Image: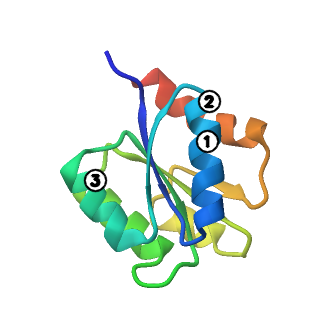
Amino acid sequence: MGRTRILVVDDNPDTRASLRQLLELLGYEVETARDGAAALKAHRERSAAVVITDILMAGIEGIETIVRFKADWPHVRVIAMSSGSYLQAAMHVGADAVMQKPFTVRTLLGALAPSEASN
């Protein structure tokens, strides 16, 4: 059985790189995407068990990304992250967990924990 695959979606390249590095150190397989459109394409090519998405992005933003993932792949765990006040909206449209930026490793692990039981 392989490692849990996570798709990180954020328009900030530094955020993508930092989360990728941290998650890989924690033992996850990680792919990144710069926006929702790239995330949907990446997931179609090679599916992920978990999607961690920012909310405010150019192109297909986070709320629409969550809606599309939950409509097409309801089994995929979606975690929303934002420094803004959009996290309640993310939960309303189907996010499985939310993280207020900046967040701690403990918060990240807590958001990921429920997905471990199903993998």
Identify which residue is drawn at 33% across, 72% down. 37
Q: Which residue is disc 2 drawn over? A: 25
Residue type at tag 3: His
- Cα distance between the residues tagged 1 and 2: 6 Å
The mark that comes first in sequence, 1 or 3, is: 1
Q: Separation of disc 2 and disc 3 at Cα?
A: 22 Å
Going by the image, does 113 lie left or right of 99? left
Q: How many numbered discs sit on the rendered protein?
A: 3
Q: Is residue 84 left or right of residue 114?
A: right
x, y percent for residue 63 = 47, 73
What amino acid type is highlighted by mark number 2? Leu
Q: Which residue is mark 3?
A: 43
Q: Quadrant of residue 36?
A: bottom left
Determine whether 11 is above or below 52 in the image: below
The residue located at (68%, 55%) in the rendering is 99
Residue where numbered disc 1 is placed: 21
- The image shows residue 55 at horizontal and vertical percentages of 56, 72
Residue 48 falls left or right of residue 19: left
Real-space CA distance between mark 1 and mark 3, rounded to the nearest whole angstrom? 20 Å
Which residue is most to the left?
Answer: 45
Q: Helix, strand, or loop for circle 3?
A: helix
- Above or below, 101 against 56 in this view is above
Q: Of the residues shown, which amino acid type is indicated by label 1?
A: Gln
Task: Name the secondary structure under disc 2.
Answer: helix
The residue sitting at 58% across, 65% down in the picture is: 13
Horizontal and vertical percent for residue 47?
27, 44
Quarter of the picture containing the C terminus is top left
| Residue 106 appears in the picture as rendered | yes
How crowded pointer 3 is (Cα within 10 Å; few <14, some 14-19, many 20+) is rated as some
